[in-house]
Image (cartoon, coloured by chain):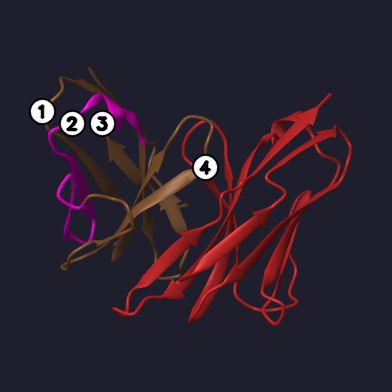
Amino acid sequence: GAVVSQHPSWVICKSGTSVKIECRSLDFQATTMFWYRQFPKQSLMLMATSNEGSKATYEQGVEKDKFLINHASLTLSTLTVTSAHPEDSSFYICSARLDSFEAFFGQGTRLTVV
Amino acid sequence: EDKVVQSPLSLVVHEGDTVTLNCSYEVTNFRSLLWYKQEKKAPTFLFMLTSSGIEKKSGRLSSILDKKELFSILNITATQTGDSAIYLCAVEARSGAGSYQLTFGKGTKLSVIP
């Protein structure tokens, strides 16, 4: 199946710094990528939908100035957590869609803000 | 506002039992319904359903969609402890901006005990 690579797998950063997470579709072009956040023992929460070449569509309650999403090419979307705080610590997952509507997920990024 | 409701939220069964997970939805411009299995980290894709009444099967798992009554079920027969996971239902629909978005249910947590 299609491969989606997410980097880094885990990151520890200090409060106040920014962290960038990359999501790449390795063997297909993804016009749409999704960013999710998972809280402990809970289901995935969709944060935003990223369409190549246009602004991301954020879900209600997600701060667009805090979670910057860029989808500059058909194979790369980035999520930047700006001025990270401990409450931003979470597991972030991206997925990329093929034209056939299947969504393939990255491995996820464990972010810990200290 | 698009809505996806899964039931039950949590389910505990013994190995060998058969389970049925439910997903109902209210969306405009429906395109497809997808089922995912989430264990530990990134979800894995199970099924994509676009047409009513056509059952999709993969081993002990099967799923069917009813576009008239707006629901889907996921069946797992002869459950095994390895089936323990959160099962996510997502509905894809065209957004007002012309792109496609996924709306996820909260998931059903299945626990299979020996």
The magenta-colored residue range is: A64-91
Q: Are marks 4 and 2 in contact (CB under 8 Å)?
A: no
Instruction: State the residue position of label 4.
Output: A43
Instruction: State the residue position of label 3.
Output: A8
Q: Quadrant of residue A109?
A: top left
Q: Distance from label 4 to label 1 (Cα)?
A: 27 Å
Q: Distance from label 2 to label 3 (Cα)?
A: 16 Å
N-terminal label among 3 and 1: 3
Q: Chain of mark 4?
A: A
N-terminal label among 3 and 4: 3
Q: Quadrant of residue A81?
A: top left
Chain shown red: that is B
Secondary structure of the residue carrying numbered label 1 = loop
Q: Is residue B64 above or below residue B17?
A: below
Q: Chain of mark 2?
A: A
Name the amino acid, label 2: Ala
Same chain? Circles 4 and 1:
yes
Q: Quadrant of the C terminus of chain A?
A: top left
Q: Is residue A113 above or below residue B91?
A: above
N-terminal label among 4 and 2: 4
- In depth, the one of B24 and A31 nearer the eye is B24
At 11% from the left edge and 27% from the top edge, which residue is drawn?
A16
Chain shown brown: that is A
Secondary structure of the residue carrying numbered label 3 = loop
Q: Distance from label 4 to label 2 (Cα)?
A: 22 Å
At 34% from the left edge and 57% from the top edge, which residue is drawn?
A60
Q: Distance from label 3 to label 4 (Cα)?
A: 22 Å
Q: Distance from label 1 to label 2 (Cα)?
A: 6 Å
Q: Position of residue A38 (x, y in %)?
A: 43, 38
- Numbered badge on residue A84: 2
